[in-house]
Every structure is written in structure tokens, then in C-alpha cells.
Amino acid sequence: MNARAESAPVGGTTAHRPATAVILAAGLGTRMKSDRPKVMHPLAGRPMLRYLLDNAASVFDRIVVVVGPGMEQVASLAAPHAVVVQHDRLGTAHAALQAADLFGGGDVAILYGDNPLITADTMRRLLACRVEDGVGLALLAMRPCDPGRYGRVVVEGGLVRRIVEWADATPEERAIDLCNAGVLCAGADRFAAWLRAVGNDNAKGEYYLGDVVAQAVADGQQVRAVEAAEDELRGINSRAELAEAEACVQGRLRAAALEAGVTLVAPDTVFLAADTVLEPDVTVHPHVVFGPGVTVRRGAEIRAFSHLEGCIVGSEALIGPYARLRPGSDVGPGAHVGNFVELKAVTLGAGAKANHLTYLGDAMVGAGTNVGAGTITCNYDGVFKHRTTIGEGCFIGSDSILVAPVAIGDGALVAAGSVITEDVPPDAMALGRARQTNKDGRGAAMRAALRSKKEQG
């Protein structure tokens, strides 16, 4: 066992009976077919392990995360909680045993990093069953729509008598719809002793956590099941199961948004990140995607097929349809970002408008300024990024190219089709285009020459 550090108490249990959550996160995720550790795969833009850490931190006094060798990324995510390394992957009971020195003197719950959707409320019920009801071992169980090959929980007189794996179950036992979720909670001393007593006489030669149930029953301890919803207890071992869990998380996020006073015109088509903030009276139209780090203030409207990440949208602002807001963008109150407009690291002042076919990158746009269709801020010279500053109350004509670094003063006007390479003073009008020359009759002559060439060849 390799202990990195022991974290300070983080949860809300009493000082008289401390509780520790041990999270097993050493799995490689072979069925994911990925080089990324399984618990680092994202749900709503956040690693799945983060969900379990955050919920456990509100319930338990201490968290210990068990990782595999070389899983520095997982250990970093777990910080500042204690981390131990399971050097040899010999099964879930063996993994839990690696944390035994950090169990403490109270109660211990063993959770799974690839089972991330357990709510804090369910964790509290599990702990209460163990502490308040005084049972020797409490476990989480569910009644899935399709019990499939889950292990069955055999209950007699309200107490769990045994866990029967599907392969070993009789037809009568397979008909039981109460299924084992694998999460266990017991007193620290007994739990450690049961883990040490678990054998590996099975096809894989591994030490399974589920065998602790038989140890507890054999010791004459009461074992009780705490039921929770299937959506909370689903495990994630494949890309298909990851997609199912994503759908579950999105459903929770949408429901929370609706409850908070947000209008989702077609909820199932809107995708949210775990940290998306939508204030009351925000309206989100169909097929909108929120990446991480988005805040939308009260009364703003996000129209269809827009994509937002790492940005702030001010109150009463109008975004889209088909707009893209990239990280570092801050759209002011009442501002408009229209169809096929992209912002990157842009501050758009109150009431400013960029309504059509425009790219604004690394720019400051003042309040009340109107940016015409087809405008581009040329922010990259091939090596460095440069900023464009546009003052308040400006008018930028359509198809203008602003070559950064450049500043447009307050109240200035840039004529359509201009290429601006020098600063424009306040209230000035800038024209940066070649002088137009008309050649009388040249159009007809060109067409005649082309027709002749076509006939000859």
C-alpha cells in the first residue's frame, strides 16, 4: 500500500462516529477501449469521478481514493483527499483493503468510481441504515427495469441473507428483481477483518467485495439493503453505458433548469454542462449546446443551433440562431450576437450588435456599437495574437477587415468593404479600400470575347 496523504474531515457526520468513504478508482476501463482511465471519462463535461467526490464530501468526514499505478491524473483530481495505490489489480476486495490503514475508528462505505451518479441523499440513507438502525452491514440495491445478469439480493424477514450471482442462481432466485449495486457500509474494524478473510477461489482468482456479505452473515451480523433508483446505481463499463449515464445526467440538469425558472423550448435537444448557470427567465431554444464554464444572466435568449462555452451572456442579451461563443467572451446586457457569428475572447458592450456572418476574436467592442455583416478582426499574425479595440457608438460597415492591433475611437464610422490597418480617431470616418474605376463597354466586350473562344474550342 502506498499512501500519499490523509485528507482533513470534509463531511457532515458527527465527531463521535466519524465516517470514511473509500472510492475504488483503479479500473483501466478495458471495455472503453481507451487510454484514458475509466473514471476520467466525462459526463456533462466533468470527469465522472468528480461527481462522486463532490457528493461524498458533503456526507463523509474523510475520503480515500484507491488508484492504480501510473494514474497520476486520477490522483491529481482526487486531491486534497487521501490517495492509495493498488499496485496489483486483484479484485475489488483487494482494492478496498489497500485503504484499510485509513479506515479510522468509525464507519466505512466502499463506493465505485465508475458508479458516479449516487446522490448525497442516498449516501446519507446508507450511512443512517448502518449507524441509526445498528445493522452490521448495509448495502445498496436496486430494482432495474431489466435485471439481466445482476447479482440477486436474497432477503428473508427484512434482512439480506446472501447475494447470488446470476450464473449461480436457481430459476427462483433469478426471478428476484432486487439486484446488488455493490456499495457496502460497515464498521471500520469489522469491515477490515472481513476484507482480509475474503478468498479468491473463483474463475478469475480475484478477491471480490461482494463476498463480504457472506462474511457478515456468517459472523451473525444483520445485513440490510437500502434501495435506490436504477439511474443512481448504474455502473459505467462501456461507451454505451457512458452514453446512458450522460442521458441520465442531462435529464437531471434539464429538470433543475426548468425548476429554477428557465424556459427550455425543447428540453431533450438542449445539452448542458455540469457547471452551466442559467438564471430565471432565460429562454433556450432547440438544439443548443452549452460547454463548460457558461453563465447566462436573467432574461437572455439563446436561439436554436448555438454553441456556447467558457463565456458570460448578459441580461436580456440575444444569441443566435447559429451563433458560436468561445472561451473568454463576455456579452453585455441587451447585446445581440446573430446568425453565423463567432466570438472568441471578446467583450461585447451593453446593447452592441453583431448580427450576421462575423468573426470577432481578441476584441473589445464598446456599448451601442453596430458591427456589420461579414466583418472580421484579423487577430493572428502567424505567431502572436493581437487585440482590436472598438469604442462606443461606432458603426462598422459590412465586409470590413480590422487588422489588429488597431483601435477604433468612440463614435467612429468604418465604411463598408474597408481594410483598416491604422487607428481611427473618435467620430472620424475611415475608408480603407481601393478607388473604384469604371471602364465603359468593357463588360460587353469581355462577354463577346468569351463567347468567341467557346465557339472556337
Image (cartoon, grey):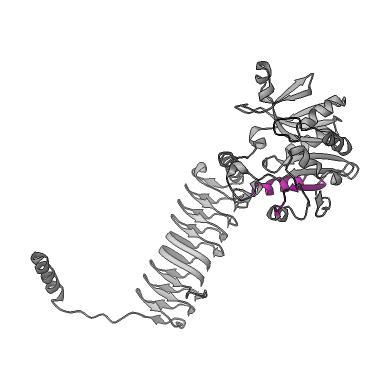
Q: Position of residue 134 (x, y in %)?
A: 87, 30
* Image height of 255 relative to 140, above or below: below
Q: Position of residue 416 (x, y in %)?
A: 35, 73
Q: Position of residue 76 (x, y in %)?
A: 72, 56
**Nearest the camera: 152 or 229?**
152
Residue at the image position 75 percent from the left and 32 percent from the top: 210
- Quarter of the image with the C terminus is bottom left
Q: Which residues are magenta?
A: 47-71
Look at the image and tell me whether residue 41 can be seen.
Answer: yes
Q: Residue furthest top?
A: 172
Residue at the image position 41 percent from the left and 77 percent from the top: 413
Q: Is residue 106 left or right of residue 243?
A: right
The part of the image, by quadrant, that contains residue 60 is top right
Q: Is residue 210 left or right of residue 351?
A: right
Q: How many marks?
A: 0
**Nearest the camera: 70 or 390?**
70
Look at the image and tell me whether residue 409 can be seen.
Answer: no
